[in-house]
Image (cartoon, rainbow, N blue to C red):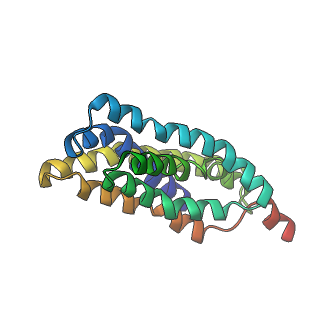
Amino acid sequence: LLLALAVMGNWALGNAIGSWLPTYYNEVFKMPLQKASSIAAIVTVGGTVACLVGGVISMRIGRHKPLLIISGLFMGLSAMGALLFNNPLLIVIMLAAFGVFSNLQTPMLFTIPMELEKASPRTGALIINAMQAGGTVGAFSGPLIVGYLTDLTGSYLPGFIIVSVISLSMLVAGLLLPETGPKARHAK
């Protein structure tokens, strides 16, 4: 359940940012749509690098929880920074940071179910299916929350704040899940 909620929060925020960010920059910061779309692509670049680096870091330190905790702590903050700062350099830095923190833990998220103590292959598969289901719910609902609240309030910020708070589910999962990395297994 914790892993499903972690993925749900991550994908809710990620899809809300991916769906609404260029429009937000265009309407709020008066940025041309082409420039806003190009800048938003930085999230994907940062995320791709972070996915690769996250796995290597986890192997080096032998732990998974620190990356979940760090990601959970800074994912929403960097997204909010990208929304609040109307400075091109700060926007680029915050979007790159959001890409990193929303993807740094991805290799570990889908490894943890297979490493849980007393988890059979069937249980691991069920956990991964629950994660995918939670992620799909988040991916579907994140953009809807932002769009609905924007229509209701006339501002994008209430919706973005809500999905940023929902993304803290990664932090909660990181704090509450047992450590399953190699160092934890060797310590037993």
Give the vertical position of 126 relative to 185 (above or below): above
Residue at position x 23%, y 51% in the image: 156
Whether residue 93 is visible, yes or no, is: yes
Give the vertical position of 27 relative to 124 (above or below): above
121 vs 153, nearest the viewer: 153
Left or right of 111 in this view: 2:
left
Numbered circles on residues, count: 0
Position in image of residue 114 (x %, y %): 71, 52
106 vs 131, nearest the viewer: 106
Position in image of residue 1 (x %, y %): 52, 60
Left or right of 85 in this view: 148:
left
Left or right of 178 in this view: 3:
left
Give the vertical position of 171 relative to 79 (above or below): below
Position in image of residue 134 (x %, y %): 46, 50
Residue at position x 50%, y 37% in the image: 44
Q: Quadrant of the C terminus?
A: bottom right
Left or right of 92 in this view: 183:
right
Position in image of residue 48 (x %, y %): 59, 39
